[in-house]
Image (cartoon, rainbow, N blue to C red):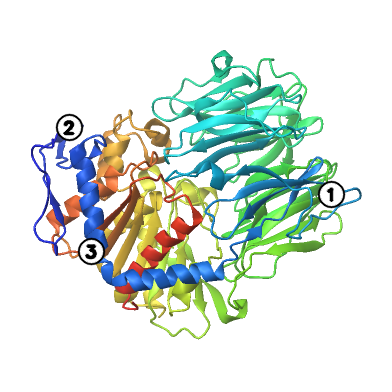
Amino acid sequence: MATGNVAPVTTETPDSPPTVQAVPSERTFHGDTVSDEYAWLSDKENPDTIAYLKAENSWTDRATAHLAELRDKIFQEIKSRTQETDLSVPSRKGDFWYYTRTVEGKQYGIQCRVAVQPGETDPPMTEDKPGEEVLLDGNALAEGKEFFALGTFDVSPDGNWLAYSTDFDGDERFTLRVKNLVTGEVLADEVPDTFYGSAWSADDSALFYTTVDDAWRPHRVWRHTVGRPAGEDVVVFEEPDERFWVGVELTRSEKFIVIDTQSKITSEVRVIPADAPTSEPVLVAPREQGVEYSVEHHGHRFLILHNKNAEDFALAYTSADAPGEWVELIPHEPGTRLESVDAFARHLVISQRRDGLTGLRVMVDGSTDSYQMEFPEPLFSVGLTSNPEYDTGSVRIAYTSMVTPDSIYDVDLVTRQMTLRKRKPVLGGYDPADYEQFREWARAADGTQVPISIVVRRGTGRNAPAVLYGYGSYEHSIDPYFSIARLSLLDRGVVFAIAHVRGGGEMGRRWYEDGKMLTKKNTFTDFVACAETLVAKGWTTADKLVARGGSAGGLLMGAIANIAPDDFAGIVAQVPFVDPLTSILDPSLPLTVTEWEEWGNPIDSAEVYAYMKSYSPYENVAKLSYPKILAVTSLNDTRVLYHEPAKWIARLRAVAPDGEYLLKTEMGAGHGGPSGRYDSWKEEAFVAAWTLDVLGLA
């Protein structure tokens, strides 16, 4: 381990990047001994580590100083296109409309509500709302803090209490508090070190929440009695298996508290009647390895969305009074991935995807008849948004595309009429007709057809500068979406594309299965195939193409840098998971054991170890001609630790010194980067300016 006495960080001249000392360090697994000469950077308490990160930040500042004017211009473009003083579409819950305000010049949202007026059925959309109550002002809570995030915001069933939790470091360790919404008093019974999620009992006397273990795995559900000290809280459920994590929520019907226990491939659910919060949790169905299921309460039954003998999931139900046998409701249909089911008093709404696009299917209670909601664009994303009311005949959906700004509709489930409540304003005369979206298909090495979503400003020529974005892990889909910040690229003639690579969920469960564990390399080769297709079809050229991805998508960026460096002019890797083998070999790190069902367990399996080592970006840095690389990370990130990109950049500099590599570390943020909206815009402007510079458009 390096110490302050060995001065591991030096800078030769103000015009050269910092150099960092390689300290001998080895590990051996399965007879394989490897060197990790920058392992000492994992010690966040070591002043030399902080000195290195600060030196890299200083070098990045110097290396991008010529972009200062462009960064400011892009920031101003994002700001000028955004309606800074705005409010969300109010959602009704009980006797109130709930919504969020944003105010020009303020970083964070303000949570508000207003009483429902007699006979009022439509959400009040005027800015002026008599009787408005401010429930929580993020700006007041964040005053004097470098970072601020809400973990839980949960109003009790009768509307009298608010449970909320805050994080001021970015490490996702939240402090839970309870506010009396009648008096405005914040109670003294706060609970530190909680995780996301909470659930109220029917009478508001009890609040359920989760806490984490040393590996930052949510493993306990607690019951807190409102008004009593946290030391009196009771553990309701504890999950000992380190592969599993737990969550807690209240059903939309407000009849049951649901405790979800999940690993990457297996799940188990317990329920507690909300009107009997001290009763023992009831198991809905025992866990069965490889079987995932979720539970939604609907009248006399629990709806079960599951993958038992149904790769793309099926829908069944069981008795809510005595859970047991599952009765089929929607059979498995290969190629149509059922993603979730939302129950309302007289309808079910099923979120699904097929052929790379999302969709919504509506069923009337008591019937197997259903219909699909129809949408006009060839590429779009749609899903349910805030729908807290159970007894309703309409639902609220969110719709967007690569040219259509985020739009909120209320849909009458009987007449099927869609009412546009709000479309996100884009100031400055934005016209969707000025832009075009396309779908291309790339042929992967094994013949698989991989979809690509593309958006350009109308009139953009061929062989244009381009950005290709990708993710490809955890069955998380990057569906077509609108971005105000992206306009700063499109209006400068940049093509923006999303590679829907395997490992994501865009094409169903098989798409995910074919991009994880011992098929993970498909994610990387799919992305390269998409890049080469953009070139082959004349959208761009390799010397004018920048790749971008974050988190597990940052692993993708590191991998393609090693396997196809000539296909890209630049790579942006944000909070990148570029040292996966080292992390997954260390069960003491946050969330590692829960990740074994995604990546494999390289401790127990020599085959998994060898496979992961063969693609790990850090392990495979070589003396190559790399494209320009920008790595962005956060010191307090608990999901992808800062030292992964820090080590990666250090090794790139040592092994392939002719490349241009930059590391930018947010010293007071977490996995999502800066928390305030203006700070986030500045971060995006920084990345956009660097990208345009690489593309020759600065």
Question: In the image, which disc is placed on residue 28?
Answer: 2
Name above or below for residue 15 compared with residue 319. Answer: below
Contact? badges 2 and 1 (CB < 8 Å): no
Mark 2 or mark 1, which has the lower sequence index?
Answer: 2
**Depth-wise, is mark 2 or mark 1 nearer the camera?**
1
CA separation, marks 1 and 3?
58 Å
**Depth-wise, is mark 3 or mark 2 nearer the camera?**
3
For label 3, the crowd category at 10 Å Cα-Cα, with few meaning under 14, some 14 to 19 and many 20 or more, is: some
Q: Residue at x 67, y 55 (%)?
A: 88
Residue that label 1 marks: 393
Residue 444 place in picture, x, y as percent: 40, 63
Residue that label 3 marks: 62
Mark 3 or mark 2, which has the lower sequence index?
Answer: 2
The front one of 608 and 398 is: 398
Say left or right for 547 vs 236: left
Question: At label 1, which amino acid type do we have?
Answer: Gly
**Depth-wise, is mark 1 or mark 3 nearer the camera?**
3
Q: Residue at x 79, y 54 (%)?
A: 123
Name above or below for residue 508 compared with residue 286. Answer: below
Question: At label 2, which amino acid type do we have?
Answer: Thr
Quick one: SS at disc 1?
A: loop
Quick one: SS at disc 2?
A: strand
Residue 259 place in picture, x, y as percent: 61, 27
Q: Residue at x 59, y 39 (%)?
A: 307
The front one of 495 and 62 is: 62
Name above or below for residue 325 compared with residue 13. Answer: above
For the question of whether residue 552 can be seen, the reply is: yes
Residue 26 place in picture, x, y as percent: 14, 35
